[in-house]
Amino acid sequence: MSQVFERYGLYFAWIISIVATLGSLYFSEIAQYVPCTLCWYQRILMYPLVILLGIASYRNDVRIIPYTLPLSIIGGGIALFHYLQQKVPGLAEIAPCTVGVPCNKDYIDWLGFITIPFLALIAFILITLCLWLCQRANKG
């Protein structure tokens, strides 16, 4: 298993970031869902990963991991907070989005728990996991 991540961990993280970015663009540009403030913060942290991880994958350069791992961890934290704002009513009242679209608005609610911030959270977790396993495999 470690050989897989040693060899393809950056590539997996890059593919996940591409899918997440394309999904984000689909929701805003095709489905016409207006992003809230927290969505924009998540985009700010996800979109550069496509370029950074793409270049690192092409060059097979694991030295990028310490620079990209904080982006995915912070993005995951924001996505988790955003998801909790949607699913825990009291939390939305404590720190509401005051400009534009409310951050607790559910554009999608698949199976009662899958929302856009949930999808972003899963993407950030998978990217973080891929990067961490790749870094660990290349150290050992």
Image: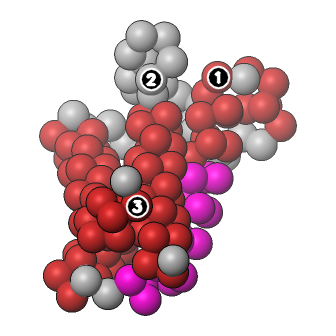
Would residue 119 be counted in the magenta stretch?
no
Q: Kindly tell me whether residue 39 is visible in this rendering.
A: no
Residue at 59% x, 61% y is: 73
| Magenta extent | 62-78
Would residue 72 be counted in the magenta stretch?
yes
Q: Hey, what amino acid is under mark 1?
A: Lys
SS assignment at label 2 = loop
Marks 2 and 3, the one that precedes in the sequence: 3
Q: Where residue 45 appears, x then y in whole percent? A: 47, 66
Q: Which residue is mark 2?
A: 114
Q: Where residue 59 appears, x then y in whole percent? A: 21, 88
Q: Where residue 90 appears, x then y in whole percent? A: 81, 24
- Indicate which label's residue lies in the foreground, 2 or 1: 2
Q: Hey, what amino acid is under mark 2?
A: Ile
Q: Which mark is residue 87?
A: 1
The answer to whether residue 125 is above or below residue 15 is above
- Indicate which label's residue lies in the foreground, 1 or 3: 3
Question: Label 1, label 3: how many angstroms apart (C-alpha)?
Answer: 36 Å
State which quadrant residue 64 falls in. bottom left
The answer to whether residue 51 is above or below residue 14 is below
Residue 67 vs residue 36, the one in the foreground: 67
